């Protein structure tokens, strides 16, 4: 592991931020319209703390136990949950997170809504959509969105997708375009704004920015070599 106190992480971050800025320029967007979520799932709490101290205050985890541990150590971070959420872990996890990106079934949607109703304030969520239509991948089929109802107890803020892995990031573009179009249609049907598109990972974030991402979820481009 590279020493987390070294300047290396700072340099990584600077390079990522400059790539974000270049993609924003190309797309005619402001960098303030993009939130970088550092995905800390492969690194220790110490490295998560280091990126937080470098100014990245939005952190993402995909496993409840890891979230509990890191959120306890870094309570001032804004935590995003991006993985599969078992319903028996909701009560302990939801109070820690500001946005659940990965609501991937009606059963989970209903369980989260029940939690939000019980506590008296809605849970902010995104619906995960399987735009790449890989059978092994979770998420709503795009065809399901037109008939989906949004229960009380959640605040739907937008959509999330994971593109299929491609050597050429350009091949991810159609999935991102589709997610944006699905968001536009859903927002029109529901009659309220869905501001967020969570799309773009280390290999494809610049394309995602060009296609309207507001939340990019970056792990390896920041943390490769820092893994625990
Ligand atoms: C791990 C993970 C990421 C980060 O992936 P990288 O390719 O390492 O940037 C983003 N989103 C989700 C849902 C993940 O599980």
Image: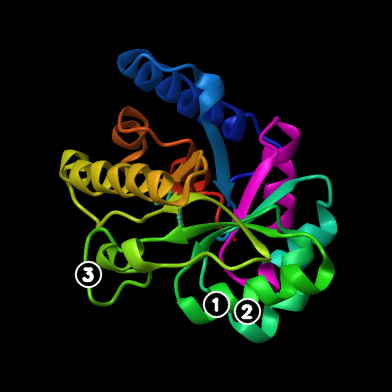
User: How did the renderer colour the structure?
Assistant: rainbow
Q: Quadrant of ligand 1?
A: bottom left
Q: Crowdedness of circle 3 by 10 Å Cα count: few (<14), some, many (20+)?
A: few
On the picture, is 71 further left or further right than 129?
Answer: right
Label 2 within 8 A of ligand 1 by Cβ: no
Q: Is the residue under label 3 in contact with that under label 1 (CB below 8 Å)?
A: no
Q: Secondary structure at mark 2?
A: helix
The quarter of the picture where the C terminus appears is: bottom right
Give the Cα distance between marks 1 and 3.
20 Å
Q: Which residue is mark 1?
A: 108
Of badges 3 and 2, nearer the viewer stands 2
The answer to if 63 sits in the magenta stretch is: yes
Q: Can you see residue 4?
A: no
| Earlier residue among tags 3 and 2 | 2
Q: Which residue is mark 3?
A: 134
Q: Nearer the viewer, residue 72 or 2?
A: 72
Dividing the picture into quadrants, the one containing residue 93 is bottom right
Q: Which residue is mark 2?
A: 111
Residue 175: % across, % down: 24, 49
Q: Crowdedness of circle 1 by 10 Å Cα count: few (<14), some, many (20+)?
A: some
Give the Cα distance between marks 3 and 2.
25 Å
Q: Residue at x 51, y 20 (%)?
A: 31
Q: Nearer the viewer, residue 191 or 187?
A: 191
Task: Please report the bounds of the magenta region as a residue range.
Answer: 43-66
Residue 122: % across, % down: 72, 60
Give the Cα distance between marks 1 and 2.
5 Å
């Amino acid at each position: 592991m590279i020493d987390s106190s070294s300047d290396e992480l700072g340099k990584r971050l600077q390079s990522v931020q400059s790539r974000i800025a270049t993609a924003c320029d190309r797309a005619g967007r402001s960098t303030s319209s993009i939130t970088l979520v550092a995905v800390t799932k492969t690194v220790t709490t110490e490295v998560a703390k280091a990126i937080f101290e470098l100014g990245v205050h939005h952190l993402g985890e995909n496993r409840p136990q890891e979230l509990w541990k890191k959120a306890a150590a870094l309570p001032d971070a804004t935590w995003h949950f991006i993985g599969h959420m078992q319903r028996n872990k909701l009560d302990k996890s939801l109070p820690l997170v500001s946005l659940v990106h990965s609501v991937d079934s009606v059963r989970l949607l209903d369980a989260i809504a029940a939690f939000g109703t019980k506590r008296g304030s809605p849970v902010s969520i995104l619906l995960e959509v399987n735009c790449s239509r890989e059978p092994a991948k979770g998420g709503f089929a795009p065809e399901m969105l037109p008939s989906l109802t949004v229960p009380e107890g959640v605040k739907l803020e937008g959509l999330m997708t994971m593109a299929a892995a491609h050597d050429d990031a350009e091949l991810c573009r159609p999935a991102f375009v589709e997610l944006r179009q699905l968001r536009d249609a859903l927002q029109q049907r529901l009659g309220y704004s869905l501001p967020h598109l969570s799309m773009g990972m280390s290999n494809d974030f610049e394309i995602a920015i060009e296609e309207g991402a507001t939340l990019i979820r970056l792990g390896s481009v920041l943390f490769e070599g820092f893994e625990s």
